[in-house]
Image (tube, grey):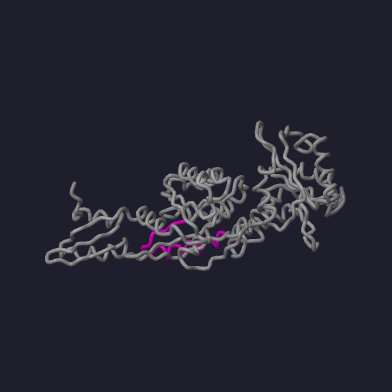
């Protein structure tokens, strides 16, 4: 990957380039997500330009005249780099750098840099390294000046030898293979830990959603834990599991997962599939959205698309509108309620709406509350309810045990004959 002059004390100044489809407004709002990504890297945005059309051209991906204009604008603003909101090929990247005389890269590399700076565990570090190497492999050529240098003998004696590019490409491929082996070991260790956890009969819920929607804050507020939280994109990369106690039951397991984003590089989707396996194995998804974000509807569709890619779109889910305290006007609130009629409105910051959320979680996992009258000889079912469901109330009577409970699966089937149905 291209190295930027990160040793300078002043912030790196970035010039951003976006593109909109026909009939869409060409304004700065279209680059809002890229703005957030670049600022997360600690860069300063000196200016931006949004193209209204982009006819593919072989040299720069756009017309030469427009490319020269962008390069001049970047120079006038003393930009240290140019960042594109769309993917650029290795050839275009090399041509752009020859034209602008400064580093040029796309949003994929920005995301990779963010992931690299936020990786904390061994698994996350390996996953990021793998994605970086896979991204860099086709871009090795433009990292060198004279690619004609040979290592080896001369023609007619020891053979032509290999170019530095060929040697470096082989080194990268070997490193990719080593990282995949290491990652397989780490994933196997995590699967062992998950198998131990699965022996405890607790339902699992995965917090999923767009990056910076407040998933970690919600996990902390619900469970009283102290998972790392920061108001930046991709602050959390590793899955973190905490226990949420429920009245009348053993509780549930809540897992915080990596946030999603639109146009997530496929190398990262593939690299983080092991992390997202926590979502695949969950009994329930809690899809967290930022109610105050103007792009909440687009973000919701992005999350659904990623869930589809990892084949967990059919898992039961609850939609949670977080940061509802930031929605002040009634028009925006009504629009959210119309678009997400079944959503639970909460504020992780102010800890409001939690009772509604927990009620929804209980109903989705254990079903609705029902009343049962158990014969005394079936008293062992009471212990089954305590272990696998939620025992709300129990009353020992002369010939039976009257209980109010929420149960599902095997317990529900065993209790069904003893259900007391309400009179019509």
Residue at 49 percent across and 45 percent down: it is 336
| Residue 182 left/right relative to 78 | left
Q: What residue span does the magenta drawing correspond to?
A: 182-206
Q: Which residue lies furthest to the left in this view?
A: 398
Q: In this view, does 381 lie above or below 49?
A: below
Query: In the image, is residue 202 part of the stretch drawn in magenta?
Result: yes
Q: Main secondary structure of the magenta part?
A: helix
- Is residue 159 something one can see in this rendering? no
Rendering quarter of residue 250: bottom left
Residue at 69 percent across and 51 percent down: it is 109
Q: Provide residue 182's location: percent of width, then percent of height.
A: 59, 61
Q: Is residue 89 above or below residue 81?
A: above
Q: In this view, does 251 lie above or below 283?
A: below
Query: In the image, is residue 113 part of the stretch drawn in magenta?
Result: no
Q: Provide residue 266's location: percent of width, then percent of height.
A: 61, 47
Q: Which of 82 and 131 is in front in this view?
A: 82
Q: Residue furthest front?
A: 329
Residue at 66 percent across and 52 percent down: it is 36
| Residue 102 left/right relative to 235 | right
Q: Provide residue 157's location: percent of width, then percent of height.
A: 86, 51
- Is residue 300 something one can see in this rendering? yes
Report the label total: 0
| Residue 261 left/right relative to 202 | right
Q: Provide residue 333's location: percent of width, then percent of height.
A: 49, 47
Q: In this view, does 213 lie above or below 334?
A: below
Q: Which of 397 and 106 is in front in this view?
A: 397
């Amino acid at each position: 990957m291209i190295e930027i002059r990160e040793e300078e004390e002043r912030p790196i100044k970035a010039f951003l380039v976006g593109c909109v489809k026909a009939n869409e407004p060409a304004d700065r709002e279209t680059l809002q997500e890229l703005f957030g990504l670049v600022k997360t890297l600690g860069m300063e945005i000196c200016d931006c330009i949004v193209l209204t059309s982009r006819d593919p051209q072989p040299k720069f991906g756009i017309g030469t005249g427009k490319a020269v204009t962008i390069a001049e604008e970047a120079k006038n603003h003393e930009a240290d780099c140019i960042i594109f909101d769309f993917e650029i090929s290795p050839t275009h990247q090399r041509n752009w750098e020859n034209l602008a005389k400064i580093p040029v890269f796309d949003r994929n590399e920005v995301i990779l840099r963010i992931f690299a700076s936020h990786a904390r565990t061994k698994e996350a570090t390996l996953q990021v390294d793998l994605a970086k190497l896979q991204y860099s492999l086709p871009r090795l050529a433009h990292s060198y000046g004279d690619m004609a240098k040979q290592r080896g003998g001369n023609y007619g004696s020891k053979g032509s030898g290999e170019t530095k590019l060929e040697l470096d490409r082989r080194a990268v491929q070997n490193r990719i293979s080593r990282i995949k082996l290491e990652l397989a070991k780490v994933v196997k260790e995590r699967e062992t830990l998950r198998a131990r956890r699965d022996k405890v009969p607790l339902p699992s819920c995965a917090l999923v959603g767009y990056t910076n929607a407040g998933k970690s804050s919600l996990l902390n507020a619900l469970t009283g834990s102290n998972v790392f939280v920061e108001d930046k994109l991709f602050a959390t990369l590793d899955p973190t599991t905490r226990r949420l106690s429920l009245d009348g039951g053993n509780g549930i397991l809540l897992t915080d997962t990596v946030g999603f984003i639109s146009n997530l590089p496929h190398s990262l989707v593939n690299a983080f599939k092991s992390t997202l396996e926590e979502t695949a194995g969950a009994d329930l998804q809690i899809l967290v959205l930022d109610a105050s974000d103007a792009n909440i509807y687009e973000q919701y569709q992005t999350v659904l698309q990623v869930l589809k890619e990892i084949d967990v779109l059919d898992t039961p889910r609850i939609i949670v509108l977080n940061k509802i305290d930031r929605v002040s006007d009634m028009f925006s609130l009504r629009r959210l309620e119309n678009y997400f009629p079944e959503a639970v409105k909460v504020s992780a910051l102010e800890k409001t709406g939690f009772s509604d959320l927990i009620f929804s979680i209980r109903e989705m996992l254990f079903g609705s509350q029902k009343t049962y009258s158990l014969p005394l000889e079936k008293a062992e079912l009471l212990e089954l309810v305590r272990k696998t469901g939620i025992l709300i109330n129990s009353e020992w009577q002369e010939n039976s045990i009257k209980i109010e409970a929420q149960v599902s699966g095997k317990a529900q089937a065993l209790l069904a004959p003893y259900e007391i149905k309400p009179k019509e």
